[in-house]
Image: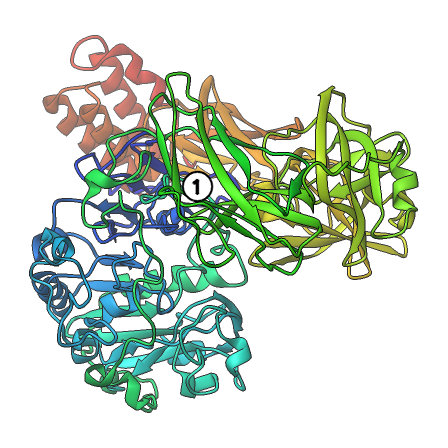
Amino acid sequence: MNRKKNQLWSIFLAFILSVIVFPIAFQAEGIDDPAPIIVPEEPNGKTVLFDNMHGQTAGQADWVIDGAFSDFAEGIAANGYQVKELRKKRPFTIGDLEKSDVFVIPEANIPFKKTEQDAMVEYVENGGSIFFISDHYNADRNKNRWDSSEIMNGFRRGAYDDPTKGMSSLEENSEVMQGVESSDWLSDHFGIRFRFNAPGNIVADHVVEPSETFDITYGVSKVTMHAGSTLAITNPEIAKGILYLPDNLDESDKWGPAVDEGIYHGGGVEEGPYAAISKLGKGKAAFIGDSSPVEDATPKYRNEETGKKKRTYDGFIDADNGKLLLNTIDWLAEQESYETFTNADIPLDEPSPILDKEIPENTTEPQHEPWSTPLDTYHWFDSVTFAPGSFGSTEDPNPEPALTLNYDSVIPNDEPFTIEIIAEGLKPGQTINGYNLGIYLDGGQQIAKVQNDDGSWPKTFGYSEPFSLVADSSGKATKELTILVNGNVEGKAKIRLRQEKTNVLTKPVVVGKAGEDIEEPSQTISIKEARETADGQKVVVEGVITTNPGIFGGKGFYIQDDSAGIYVFQHEENFQLGNKVTITGTLTTFQGMKEITDVEKIEVNGKSELPTFSPVDQLDGSKQGERVTLEGEIDNIQSYWNAFEFDLRKDSQTTRVRIDNRTDITLEAFQEKFHEGDNVSVSGIASIFKGTYQLLLVDLIHIEKLTSSSPVIEDISDFSTFEITKEYELPVVVHDPDGDLEDVTIELDGKTMKDYISISPLEYKPGSYEIKIIASDSAGNVVEESFPVEAVLSLKELDELVELGREQAYLDGKIEKRLLKKAKDVQTAKNENARNGKWNALMNQIHAQLGKEIKTDYIHFWDKPVDIK
């Protein structure tokens, strides 16, 4: 008799999925270090390999499986795939690819060599699959003149005849540029080409029916784009679009810095697919024109040029982005016999319209490249020059400097003066580069000239030449600049310090005559009085900082005193939650919200306890800017590229709750604990935006369930008996209405199990037992259910019991044959009387050999079968 596992139930455990990521590195890491691997909980035997050899971490990109592509990678692993990273000394070969089922190329920033292109074609023709994830034209994150769309196409825009056009001799002769050749590679082999257009923030909702996309678009209705590109179908027999942008787009829909019209064919099908697929030989390929829907908000590395921290966004969990991406991986990983779409049961596309300027040989460079001049110390092709903490650097990340400006509150417009820049908290000898300083009026008019290092003066008003700061032995760096302001300007202005065009510090100042008296700040008033003051008036208020600076833009924060609360829009560093501060600034209203801006001075007067949250029934104008608590039912959860929101409903009142991505609260973390229909208490900051009152949640611990449901263990009383000779794996069904199931434990006769009941042959002797199931959730609810179960020996299993006796060394082979014969006699007896007689003969044989050819404890399994009367 064959023994088989009995799979009787399905298990639904919210916590069952887990993946293992190793190594986890937060220090310096490079191409020679071990690559991370994500091992699935339930492997399907297939592997997805991610490229990290072609600038995937350049600039603000962090497209690695344990960084800002981790949500995508872990989602793949959750579907059973092993996920690995490819890192090695260039170039890769067919041998590096052929052991994987899918090769993912996240937004490459270093061009492929001809040998690598050949390896990819061979890999796909032999049955492998590639997922090309590109971005908009002129993304060029490492400033090497090559964008991901150009790299994947196989040629540079305006440089078809010379892939090194415009490069320095160092760049041209670098190892990474050797063997790079121009060709229309992607179109020649995959029947498709990335366009050089640049649509901006657009929701792609023209989804091709799943029946025409091999079910890749199943469950997909919207996918976001935040500055990307579309593709052009050049050979419909092997390439097909599966997702398009809306119709009727124009130049107003392009990405702001686009170098041309940005929208080539008015959107829709004519603009070309946003996502597409292709078939080559035995393998496949897929394409998407933006990395935004793939990324998440967990970057791992520092910027390789500047060493600054990166900021990425939660695109993977927005709209149906993740669904499309994971469906794509499943399709790519499935081997199929057809070699072109003409052999598949789907309609073919028409070739996409192509502008003359899109023909490779006719392309031109619309503006000078690269889009920005890299730092002198940075060479994109040489990791030795990479900033500490970036991928490829051998140095750990440098500390972030604390920056201050020393200057008089009234600066003269009739003589030169100085401003001192101070950076503290650096490592001794550390150099920070790329800074410049300017002074401007509201509206952006530059009003100052900054003296050059050689003593000369610039001809026009504007930002200074770039300068560096070098730390002394104490970690402090200073730089003094001499400045001359436009003599025709008086009144309020702003001083701004930038690094690589990023604003790092903005301070108010007054322009006047040398020696002019400063108007003393007005008397300190309560925040309530300040809120009642007319816009444009200077106010001085005291309060406690109630939100972490920067989670709502710039370095701004909310403050509150005993009377009211208000938002402070400012850009200075070094303020913390709980600081007690005195602020001098100007009252204004922005999108309906009262706030203090044009901040002249912030004094820290120590630390203070945060004000308690005030319970309110609804939001109105009375508690704006304050910490409040509302109760209600969660409804209408919606996700956006920069935030997610939900309605809080109670009786007839509805309050919108907003969670900004900069709070580091993810939709995924929220939905692990809370769902639509939950009754909750939410504490946050009362606010308003364009006439809509909203509650700003700043920490996930500030939302609590009002009622906590216990786990529900489904009845297993149908499993009332089990054969002692069989093997069982019986999953247990446990639901938790709140979605916070934490643990399920099963106990049977002193044996403890997890998730399912496991019973091995002859693990239990015949008799009565109790199965105890204990389930607990994160709220502390514990539920216990017990179910009686009977272990039995049946007539048909007698021969199996004999065979198991020999396998488990209860008896030897000689006695086995005799016992098998007697067991068969019992099973084949013609009537009950005969069967009882044969049973007695079998038992006599066993008793006669106990302690001899049969171990004594074997007799415990030989209860009379339940089906012998």
User: Which residue is painted at 59% across and 30% down in the image?
Assistant: 574
Q: Nearer the viewer, residue 721 or 663?
A: 663
Is the residue 358 above or below the residue 174 in the image? below
Left or right side of 833 for 438:
right
- Whether residue 869 is visible to the viewer of this picture, yes or no, is no
Residue 392 percent coordinates (x, y)? 24, 39
Q: Which image quarter is the C terminus in?
A: top left
Which kind of residue does numbered mark 1 sit on?
Answer: Leu
Residue 340 percent coordinates (x, y)? 21, 81
User: Which residue is painted at 71% across and 41% down in the image?
Assistant: 599
Left or right side of 432 for 147:
left
User: How many residues crowd mark 1 within 10 Å: few (<14), some (14–19), many (20+)?
Assistant: few
Query: Residue 369 sits in which quadrant?
Result: bottom left
- Whether residue 509 is visible to the viewer of this picture, yes or no, is yes
Residue 669 percent coordinates (x, y)? 56, 42
Q: Nearer the viewer, residue 252 or 494?
A: 494
Is the residue 866 above or below the residue 437 in the image? above
Q: Which image quarter is the N terminus in?
A: top left
User: Which residue is painted at 32% across and 40% down in the image?
Assistant: 796
Q: Nearer the viewer, residue 60 or 612?
A: 60
Is the residue 68 above or below the residue 284 in the image? above
Left or right side of 705 for 620:
right
* Structure colour scheme: rainbow
User: Which residue is painted at 29% across and 90% down in the image?
Assistant: 356
Query: Residue 149 sits in which quadrant?
Result: bottom left
Q: Nearer the viewer, residue 659 or 207?
A: 659
Q: Which residue is mark 1?
A: 17
